[in-house]
Image (tube, rainbow, N blue to C red):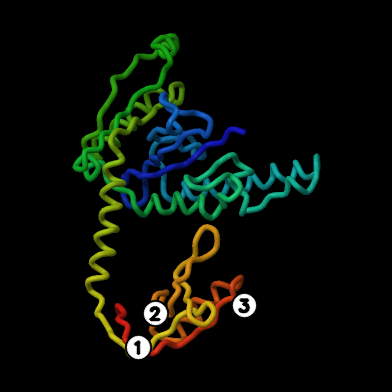
Amino acid sequence: MSYSILYNKQFIKVDDNHIIVITEQGDNNVWECDNKRRARDWGNCYAHSDGAIIVANDKLLADIDAFRQTTMERCEEHVKQYNESWAYDDKRWGYHTGLALYGKSTRNTTFGAYKGFYQTGIKQAMTIEELVKLGVSVKLYPYRWVDKDILDKGLEIKPDVWFSSTEQMVEKIKEYSEYYKGEVTLYLNVYSMDRVLFNRKNDRIMAKSMKRKDKQELTVNEYFVLAYGESCSFIKRTKFGFSFSYTLTGGKAFMTEKQANAFFKRMPEYKDRFTVKKVEGERTFLK
């Protein structure tokens, strides 16, 4: 079954209340020429608005809620026609809509995660000036398979426009939209957007590193571990269960018994395999 995949997003900020939705997306059954990864592109492929390139933040989120409502209604009709297996479930949003967020399947792409994708996009939106400084290029163009697709409508083919400022971007989008009046689809091509994602990842790593540096070291004379048997201790969860140390001092340590118990409560499947145990000896923690 074919479905669409949302890989990344980087919205363009027009003002405090308006954005241009830019996403990186593709289909699960379309691959690049070398067949090493699925094909994907950056662009303004936002399917739930009225076709406008610039959209109000509130309208974007309202459109997503409306999309959910129509999906629920469609599922209800399928239940009447077929059976309860077609019933709507927020947790199976991707299955109902043929959509998946990158790293998830359609069956575990929830509505909350889908809407959160756009909410985060609004918060992280950057102006065209900021994007240009990072080496990102954005081009507006009237789409056609061949030129006569536009010329046969008695319209001219307006030249491609590379955005350089917010003012120029808004002006050109308005000009082209008013000229074509929906007769021709307007698209944005985006180049080098991965530079933004790379910088954002580095910023997160740097912030995390700085946060760790700000923490103070505290050495205690006793601490707590999750004991596995008499002399082993829990290290971490793994894909197939958990890993453990053959000593009590080599596993994951907690400064207080309360912290150890809180962590242990999040592992109910192992309640009979571990116990919270105090270990005498020095251990240094970041606080």
Q: Amino acid at mark 1?
A: Gly
Q: Nearer the viewer, residue 174 or 147?
A: 147
Q: Residue at x 25, y 42 (%)?
A: 131
Q: Are marks 1 and 2 in contact (CB under 8 Å)?
A: yes
The location of residue 151, given as percent across then percent down, is: 40, 10
Mark 3 or 2 closer to N-term?
Answer: 2
**The residue tagged with tag 1: helix, strand or loop?**
strand
Q: Nearer the viewer, residue 247 or 287?
A: 247
Q: Are marks 3 and 2 in contact (CB under 8 Å)?
A: no
Would you say 61 lies left or right of 161 here?
Answer: right
Q: Which mark is residue 250?
A: none
Quarter of the image with the C terminus in it = bottom left
Q: Amino acid at mark 3?
A: Asp
Which residue lies under the disc numbered 3?
272
Question: Looking at the picture, does residue 238 appear above or below residue 190?
Answer: below
**The residue tagged with tag 3: helix, strand or loop?**
loop
Q: Amino acid at mark 2?
A: Thr
Q: Nearer the viewer, residue 255 or 117?
A: 255
